Image (tube, rainbow, N blue to C red):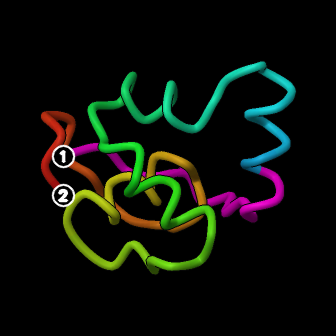
Amino acid sequence: MARSRRNIRTIQEVSADFQQRGKSVAEWAREHGIRPGVVYDLMLGRSAGKRGEAHRAAVLLGIKDGVVDRAGAA
């Protein structure tokens, strides 16, 4: 199990980070084995990332404190 970062980021900070790196949300999602629609829902506030793939994405993005399994399961 991997412990998440304690420094929670805002959606705006995550978006700025994507812009600074020249990376799309879809590209980041594919690199992490997450469906792009799940990440877009988080970024647009349509999902709270409470469980499953959305939880995993939220923790990896740094917008939520939590624990994710290294194998990819939440």
Residue 31, horizontal then vertical, whole percent: 39, 22
Q: Residue 69 carries which label?
A: 1
Which type of secondary structure does the marked residue at label 2 adopt?
loop
Disc 2 target residue: 74
Label 1 – label 2 distance at C-alpha: 6 Å
Answer above or below: position of 28 versus 25.
above
- Magenta-colored span: 1-13
Vertical placement of residue 5 versus 48, above or below: above
Is there a contact, CB below 8 Å, between mark 1 and mark 2?
A: yes
Q: Position of residue 27 (x, y in %)?
A: 50, 25
Q: Residue at x 52, y 56 (%)?
A: 40
Question: For the C terminus, which image quadrant?
Answer: bottom left
* Type of amino acid under label 2: Ala
Q: Tag 1's secondary structure?
A: loop
* Left or right position of 52 against 42: left
Q: Residue at x 76, y 47 (%)?
A: 15
Label 1 neighbour load within 10 Å: few <14, some 14-19, many 20+: few
Is residue 7 left or right of 25 when viewed as pictured? right
